[in-house]
Image (cartoon, rainbow, N blue to C red):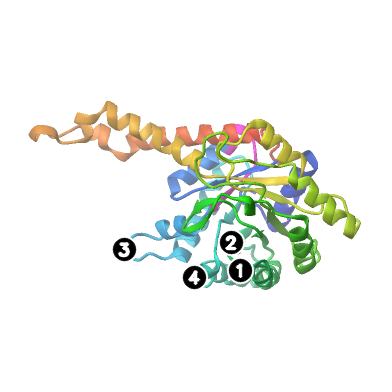
Amino acid sequence: MPIATPEVYAEMLDRAKAGKFAYPAINVTSTQTLHAALRGFAEAESDGIVQISTGGAEFLGGQYNKDMVTGAVALAEFAHIVAAKYDVTVALHTDHCPKDKLDGYVRPLLDISAERVARGENPLFQSHMWDGSAETLADNLAIGQELLAKAAAAKIILEVEITPTGGEEDGVTHEINDELYTTVDDALRTAEALGLGEKGRYLLAASFGNVHGVYKPGNVVLRPELLKDLQQGVGAKYGVTSPFDFVFHGGSGSTEQEIATALENGVVKMNLDTDTQYAFTRPIVDHMFRNYDGVLKVDGEVGNKKVYDPRSWGKSAEAGMAKRVTEACANLRSTGTKLK
C-alpha cells in the first residue's frame, strides 16, 4: 500500500500524534525530486508526505502550456505507479493555495477526487491546503467551511492556515512581525467554524513565528510553546485533550529543541522545501565545477557526453536530497516508524 488510502492516512496522523513524532512533508517539483523524497523515506524506514505547491504544479505542467492541475495530476499518477517500488507508505498533498488560485488548483482537484470516490476508487490526493492567511480570519474560515465540506465528501483531509507565516511562498508574502503568532481567540474561532472533526478532518497550520525560506539564527523568534496554549485554550472549552493536529511551516533552520517542543505540542506534519532544494542542487553545482570543460564545448572542443548527460549529475542530486530527507525523519522522530 505505497500510496495511503484515506483510512491509512488518518491512521498515520493518529500514530504520529500519539507517538509525538511528525512526518516530513517534502515539496517536489519533478519526478526526480519525487524519487529523492521516496528514497529518503525508504532509507529512514519512515512513512511520509509528498507535496506539490501551485508553483511546483505549474512547473510540472510544462512551460509550453502552463497548467497547475495538469502538473499536479501528472505527478500524482506517476507517484501511484513508482511508489509501489518503495517499502513505505506515503500521502500526496498539495501545498499553499491562496484565494486567487483556488479555482485553478484545489477546487478542480477536489472535483477529480470526488469523481474517483463516486466510482468506488480512492481520492487522487490525500490532503489539500487552503492558505487563507492573506484574508481576514472571517473570510478565511468561511472559505474553509466550503472547502472542508467538499474535502470530507471526497475522503480528503484539508489543511488550513489561519494566520500568516512570514517570508514568501509562491507569491504569497507576509512581513516578519508580531502578526506571526496565532492567538487562542484565533484558535477558538477556528474550532467554532470548522468543528473538531465532526465536519471533516483538518490539519491546522498555526503561526508561532514561522518564516518561509532561509534565515539565520536570531533573525526569527520561534515560540513553539504557543501551540500548547492553543491546545489547552480550545480543549478547555470543548472538553477534549489536544484537539488540533498542527503543521509546522517555515521549518528550515529550526533548532532541534524548537522542533522537539513543537512535536510535544501536537505537530504531526512539518514542511521542508528550502533545505531539500539546496540538498538537491548542491551536488549538481559540484559536478559542474569539477567538469567545467566537459559539460561545456570550450574552445571549439566537443565536451564530454558522459558528464553532461543529465543522468551523470542527476543521480548525485537525488542522493543528496534523499540524505536530507533521512535527516528530517531523524529530527522529527519518524525514523523506523513505518507502518508494518
User: Is residue 340 among what the camera can see?
Assistant: no
Q: Which residue is mark 4?
A: 104
**Between residues 329 and 145, which one lies in front from this camera angle?**
145
* x and y percentages locating residue 122 in the rendered image: 64, 62
The residue indicated by pointer 1 is 116
Q: What amino acid is at disc 1? A: Arg
> Mark 2 highlights which residue?
124
- Magenta span contains residue 44: yes
Q: Distance from label 2 to label 1 (Cα)?
A: 8 Å
Residue 64, numbered label: 3
- When the figure is inspected, residue 137 is found, relative to residue 298, above or below; the finding is below
Magenta span: 41-51
Dots 2, 1 in contact, CB < 8 A: yes
Identify the secondary structure beneath mark 1.
Answer: helix
Instruction: Judge by depth and name the residue closer to the eye, 80 or 112.
Output: 112
Q: Amino acid at mark 3?
A: Tyr
> How many numbered marks are there?
4
Question: Judging from the image, what secondary structure is the residue with disc 3 in?
Answer: loop
Residue 266 in percent (x, y) is at: 76, 45
Query: Is 7 included in the stretch rendered in magenta?
Result: no
Q: Is residue 104 above or below residue 288?
A: below
